[in-house]
Image (cartoon, helix red, strand yellow):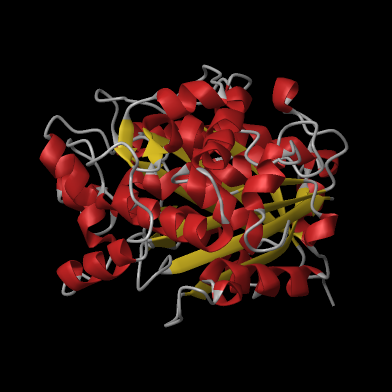
Amino acid sequence: MSSNDIYIVGVGMTPFGKFLDRSVKELTAEAVNAALMDAGAGIADIEGAWFANAAQSTLEGQGSIPGEIALRNMGIQEIPVTNVENACASASTALDMATTWLEAGRGGVALAVGAEKMFHTDKAKMFSVFDGGWDVHDVEAATNRLLALGADMDDPDGPEDSGARSVFMDVYAALAKFHMATFGTTQEQIAAVAAKNHVHSQHNPLSQYQAPMTVDEVMGARKISWPLTLPMCSPISDGAAAAILCREEELHRFDKSRAVKIHATALRSGSDRKPEEFARHVTARAARDAYEIAGLGPDDMNVAEVHDATAFAELQQIENLGFCEFGAGGALTQSGATSLGGTIPVNPSGGLESKGHPVGATGLAQIFELTTQLRGEAGGRQVENARYAIAENGGGFHGIEEAIACVTILGRA
């Protein structure tokens, strides 16, 4: 009987940034062709495809069959194509579904791709992409509940700056203030996360921003929603990323020395819980699932990519992944443990804050980075002797946490 172990044999990614003159079709083709070239494969080798996108429906009206259209445009046709929309976790969900399809024996080689065009000449329309990321029937009550979490922490500099931004920045700010009030986390510790990621990004040629920053520069930047400043927040981005996967019995068709094993993928949706029940956070639960499936634990991980939609989010997610106790994420970051050269480097790509956050592509961009790390091909941002890697990708918001979380564990083949 054949093994149902699944491997990543090719990855591809476009630069992330502002590309008003490029289409979803063009970005998709660039990422997929790069992944095929990396795998030494051709279009004819792909037996099933999963296409992730979250914004095209709102911005272009392409609410149905975006994957079939984008992929046929580059010559991929006849095979089953599944469209995936799961907010910011769309691409990691596509990877999870492609992995499950291969494990079930439905095919031998699969494609997971995420592509997103978020920049738009109409800024109001651009920011409206985020409006569907929570319960549209409960917006006012949900906003009040979330903002109440930060009511005990006042902004020492007075009222917030005005300006266009996603409401989720206010949500993350409220969660950050609750964490500060509960554990004594400081704005400087949150700034340390952002500074680290901006330093990492200077070694990533595909990153949207590649300029290093200091903690003081981060704290002194324009305020978005206290305690968050502009460099602590992920930007609007365009881009695409893709991965070619195969079953173990198909591995002989590819370069085994560069294959990366998928040890686990775990999807969890959120639940009704009290704010102080940190161990019940959706990501903490997904992480425990993934560790159990993989037969590994937090101490086995050598590198991580997490969903730092804001710097506070990274601080929260490294706690959820078990890299430290709840409440200790700020101290762990300040210790240097999560920096390149530390015990568990986090977001060597620069993270969403620097690399960019094209919503439907983000999860596979994390997989691109971790695959590159495990192959030892990351150049100036390489984590030495990386054997196991973990990705955390969350999407939307429901209650007091992300609506969905996906945790993926990879390892050198």
Compared to residue 182, the image places residue 366 above or below, namely above
Compared to residue 219, the image places residue 67 above or below, namely below
Q: From the viewer's perspective, tell me whether residue 278 is left or right of residue 247.
A: left
Can residue 123 be seen here?
yes
Measured from the top left, where is residue 302 in percent x and y? Answer: 80, 46
Can residue 79 be seen here?
no
Residue 132 position by quadrant: bottom left
Which residue is situated farthest in the bottom direction here? 272
Measured from the top left, where is residue 61 in percent x and y? Answer: 15, 51
Measured from the top left, where is residue 122 in percent x and y? Answer: 11, 34
> Is 26 in front, or is 300?
300
Instruction: Kindly identify the residue that appears in the image at 58 percent across and 35 percent down.
Output: 192
Q: From the viewer's perspective, tell me whether residue 147 is left or right of residue 363.
A: left
Instruction: Kindly identify the residue that appears in the image at 42 percent across and 60 percent down.
Output: 395
Compared to residue 19, the image places residue 369 above or below, namely below
Compared to residue 58, the image places residue 206 above or below, namely above
> Is 7 in front, or is 406?
406
Measured from the top left, where is residue 15 in percent x and y? Answer: 47, 26
The quarter of the rendered structure image containing the N terminus is: bottom right
> Is 83 in front, or is 16?
16
